[in-house]
Amino acid sequence: MDLDLVEISPNADPPVCKLVDYQKFLYQQKKKQKEMKAKTTKVILKEIRFGPNTDAHDYDFKMKHAQKFIGEGAKVKAFVFFKGRSILFKEKGEILLLKLAQDLEEIAKVEQLPRLEGKRMTMFLAPKTKTKS
């Protein structure tokens, strides 16, 4: 009959086997895996760069970009880059990032609070999950 004995679930007690065409079985498995892969959500990470002395207008402009990115479902990595001696203004950078988190708290949640790594202070924001009511 040109059929093969295929072990479907080896961990079951007793193991389950079927008589099927092995090539057709492999094709169906690949098709299922491709469908599962297509259904998974891909995490997009957008970056927004600030300086320690960013003005109000520039801040508003970049905050609107962050709102747009979060509205699209992307995560946002906001960071303050300290050049040269501007590392002395660590507090300004942290205040700037916390202000951004506070301004976006309605649509985003903070995944990681501001943390200094070398010459960069980074913070991650993710979109809030919508509750079904």
Image (cartoon, rainbow, N blue to C red):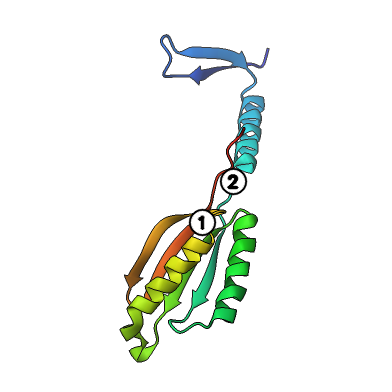
Viewer-proximal residue, 112 or 44? 112
**What type is the residue that disc 2 sits on?**
Thr
**What type is the residue that disc 1 sits on?**
Glu
Q: In this rendering, does residue 119 appear at all?
A: no
Q: Residue at x 40, y 87 (%)?
A: 83
Q: Quadrant of the C terminus?
A: top right
**1 or 2: mark nearer the eye:** 1
**Which residue is at the far bottom?**
85
Q: Quadrant of residue 38?
A: top right
Give the x, y percent position of residue 18: 57, 13
Viewer-proximal residue, 5 or 127? 127
- The residue wearing badge 1 is 105
Give the x, y percent position of residue 104: 54, 60
Q: Quadrant of residue 117?
A: bottom left
Give the x, y percent position of residue 91: 34, 76
In the rendered image, the vertical position of residue 103 relative to residue 52, given as above or below:
above
Q: Residue at x 51, y 75 (%)?
A: 49
Mark found first going from the N terminus, 1 or 2: 2
Give the SS element for disc 1.
loop
Q: Is residue 92 left or right of residue 35?
A: left
- The residue wearing badge 2 is 41
Give the x, y percent position of residue 46: 56, 65
Q: Is residue 131 left or right of residue 10?
A: right
Q: In this rendering, does residue 47 appear at all?
A: yes
Q: Residue at x 59, y 58 (%)?
A: 70
In the rendered image, the vertical position of residue 84 relative to residue 32, given as above or below:
below
Mark 1: give few (<14), some (14-19) or many (20+) Cα within 10 Å: some
Q: Residue 40 shows which numbered tag?
A: none
Mark 2: give few (<14), some (14-19) or many (20+) Cα within 10 Å: few
Q: Quadrant of the N terminus?
A: top right
Q: Residue at x 64, y 56 (%)?
A: 71
In the rendered image, the vertical position of residue 53 relative to residue 106, given as above or below:
below
